[in-house]
Image: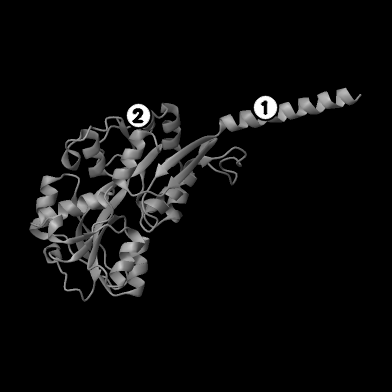
Amino acid sequence: MLNTLKSAALGALLSVGLAASASAQEIKFFTIGTGGTAFTYYPVGGVIANAISKPPGSRECGEGGSCGVEGLIASAVSSRGSVDNVNAIISGLRNSGFAQSDVAFWAYTGTGTMDGQEPATELRTIAALFEEHIHLVALADSGINSVADLKGKRVSLDEPGSGTYVDAGLILEANGLGVDDVTAEALKGNAAAEALRNGKIDAFFAVAGFPTGGIVELASSADIKLVPIDGAGADALTEKYGFFAASDIPAGTYEGVDATPTVAVGAQWFTSAKEDEELIYNITKALWNDESRKLLDVGHAKGKTITTDTALNGIGVPLHPGAERFYKEAGLIK
């Protein structure tokens, strides 16, 4: 009798173990490299990760449950930004990530700021997300009224490995300056805002969809300005680099700050050609379903601008076959 009970117990344990093993095999983890927690990539990444996830045991879509990919658990990972995310995708460290359109194109082709580096030929696009504006932030009484006024000043260009760092260098160059003409700091997000508030730097660059949290918080506690990026320097930039476009940050986006002309690039979502076609197809489909629309609309101020109407805007890196299949089925690619 004892042996029978032992056998039954062993059988039950084996059954539970096998079931748990089978369940574990159904789970797929998928990472999204974003950016610093104070700017736009990270919170938007969290909304998208939530939208495409559907862990085992979730309630059904339409019944209060997730409408994501069956068995998928996606997570937004804070990172140093565009360049870091591209490198992490190619090395296999992350499944996907956000990057500026210019940075991704240069990485894919081994040109521009990535000249001399091996082209990241396995980089693939999932979707264009939203427009990112270059913010050049200074205190209101700083006397800094143009990019040219940065000469000799203490300026944070963000960390090397970020798209902001790349673009800050290009903006300085287009205005007849170089990195050596400023005292360059490598501060990110809240650290840059805090340094400006405390007088440790004179200005900082940030590339982010507006309104971005770190600057909203700064504007509520200090009198700041957005320095215009316009005129001949902006014209030279947009003429030389097709990924830049002239665009304003509206008045009132940040407390006490007037409308400011600047330039913008596209924020896009990338993955590797090595990622499974069916998985990326399902992820793309989940991103654009009606339930995800609701999450994007309420999850972040920039979410409402993430639409299928602009999902293919400014794509300079080939679509992943899974994403391409979805867009063809949706009639977005003829």
**Residue 215 placed where, x, y %?**
33, 64
The colour scheme used to paint the residues is one colour
* Classed neighbour count for the residue bearing mark 1: other residues with Cα under 10 Å, few (<14), some (14–19), many (≥20): few
**Residue 164, horizontal then vertical, whole percent:** 25, 52
How far apart in space, not on screen, are marks 1 and 2 (Cα)?
33 Å
What amino acid does circle 2 point to?
Answer: Ala
Q: Are marks 1 and 2 in contact (CB under 8 Å)?
A: no
Label 2 CA crowd tier, 10 Å (few <14, some 14–19, many 20+): many
Residue at the location (24% across, 67% down)?
201
Q: Is residue 16 above or below residue 66?
A: above
Q: Which image quadrant for residue 249?
A: bottom left
Tell me which amino acid carries mark 1: Leu
Question: Which of the 4 quarters of the picture holds residue 205?
Answer: bottom left
Q: Is residue 55 left or right of residue 264?
A: right
On the question of residue 312 being in view, the answer is: yes
Residue 18 disc label: 1
Residue 99 in sight in this render = no
Dot placed on the residue nearer the N-terminal end, 1 or 2: 1
Residue farthest right in this picture? 1
Dot 1 falls on a residue whose secondary structure is: helix
| 40 vs 315, nearest the viewer | 40
Q: Which mark is residue 190?
A: none
Quadrant (top left, top right, bottom left, bottom right) of the C terminus: top left
Residue nearer the viewer, 230 or 90: 90
Instruction: Tell me if residue 39 comes above or below residue 272 in the rendering.
Output: below
Residue drawn at x 49%, y 46% is: 50
Task: Classify residue 6 as left or right of residue 287.
Answer: right
Q: Measuring from the top left, give residue 325's x and y in whole percent.
A: 37, 28
**Mark drawn on residue 273:** 2
Q: Is residue 221 above or below residue 209?
A: below
- The percent coordinates of residue 4 (x first, y second) are 87, 23
Residue at disc 2, secondary structure: loop
